[in-house]
Each structure stands twice: as structure tokens, then as C-alpha cells.
């Protein structure tokens, strides 16, 4: 059994999921979904053990602005490294915010969105 579960219709979303997968615990699911406006997003579902005495299911949606996604798709694979670095930085910052909230005694939300715009591609 694979440590992570990938359910992505488009290869670029599978690639994006694999770039950030090591930031999450095993058994995390990466699912490509359409947002309300039809734009594809990546939703990450995982069980967080570090935000309290009980396990918590959390969903993080990575939403990429349509224009940035179009530029990313048009890029040759060898030029995608910068986009991957931006993606990882934003996801790491989001996870860090959740940890900070928990450390400060605040409620950790069950749903989080990471919005990527022009900086992504």
C-alpha cells in the first residue's frame, strides 16, 4: 500500500501533490476537485495528531489562480522548480500557522485554503 493516496485527473495536479506530500503524514489523500467556478484545485485530507489529545481531520485546499495555472501548464517541466518552491513555502507557512494557533490555545480550523496567484507561475 502506498503511503499517500493520489486522486488527480490531471498529471500536473499529481505532480503538485507529490511536491508537497512529504510535508504531511502517511495516509494523506491528495484529491483534485473543481472549485465552485470550475477551476481545478488540490484538496489535501489528513489526520493531524499534533493539534490536541485526539486526532483531527483537516482539509487544506490549494487554489491556484486560473492565469497562473495556465502559465504553469504551458511551462516546460524543467522550468517548474520555482513554482514548486513557492508552493512548498506557502504550504509550509500554512502548516506553521496552524501549529502557532494551537500553541497559542486557539481553535485550529478543520478547513484551510492556500491561495496561489501570480507568484506561483
Image (spheres, rainbow, N blue to C red):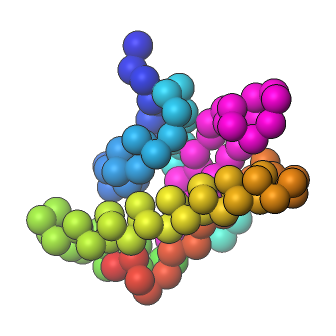
Q: Is residue 5 left or right of residue 47?
A: left
Q: Is residue 1 left or right of residue 40?
A: left
Q: Residue at x 44, y 66 (%)?
A: 89
Q: Residue at x 68, y 47 (%)?
A: 59
Measured from the top left, where is residue 61 in percent x and y?
A: 62, 57
Q: Magenta part of the protein: which range?
A: 39-64
Q: Residue at x 66, y 63 (%)?
A: 97
118 lies above or below 5: below
Measured from the top left, where is residue 92 in percent x and y?
A: 50, 59
Residue 38 at least partly seen: no
Q: Residue at x 39, y 76 (%)?
A: 120
Where, by quadrant of the figure, is residue 100 drawn?
A: bottom right
- Magenta stretch secondary structure, dominant: strand
Q: Is residue 99 left or right of residue 21?
A: right
- Towards the viewer: 109 or 1: 109
Where, by quadrant of the figure, is residue 51 drawn?
A: top right
- Towards the viewer: 11 or 43: 43
64 lies above or below 95: below
59 lies above or below 3: below
Q: Is residue 41 magenta?
A: yes
Amino acid at each position: 500500500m502506498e503511503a499517500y493516496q493520489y486522486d488527480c485527473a490531471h498529471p500536473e495536479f499529481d505532480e503538485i501533490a507529490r511536491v508537497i506530500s512529504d510535508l504531511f503524514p502517511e495516509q494523506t489523500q491528495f484529491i483534485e476537485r473543481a472549485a465552485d467556478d470550475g477551476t481545478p484545485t488540490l484538496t489535501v485530507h489528513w489526520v493531524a495528531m499534533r493539534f490536541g489529545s485526539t486526532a483531527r481531520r483537516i482539509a487544506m485546499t490549494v487554489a491556484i489562480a486560473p492565469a497562473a495555472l495556465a502559465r504553469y501548464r504551458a511551462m516546460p517541466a524543467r522550468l517548474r522548480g520555482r513554482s514548486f518552491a513557492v508552493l512548498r513555502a506557502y504550504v509550509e507557512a500554512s502548516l506553521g500557522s496552524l501549529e502557532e494557533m494551537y500553541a497559542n490555545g486557539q481553535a485550529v480550523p478543520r478547513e484551510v485554503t492556500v491561495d496561489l496567484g501570480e507568484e506561483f507561475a
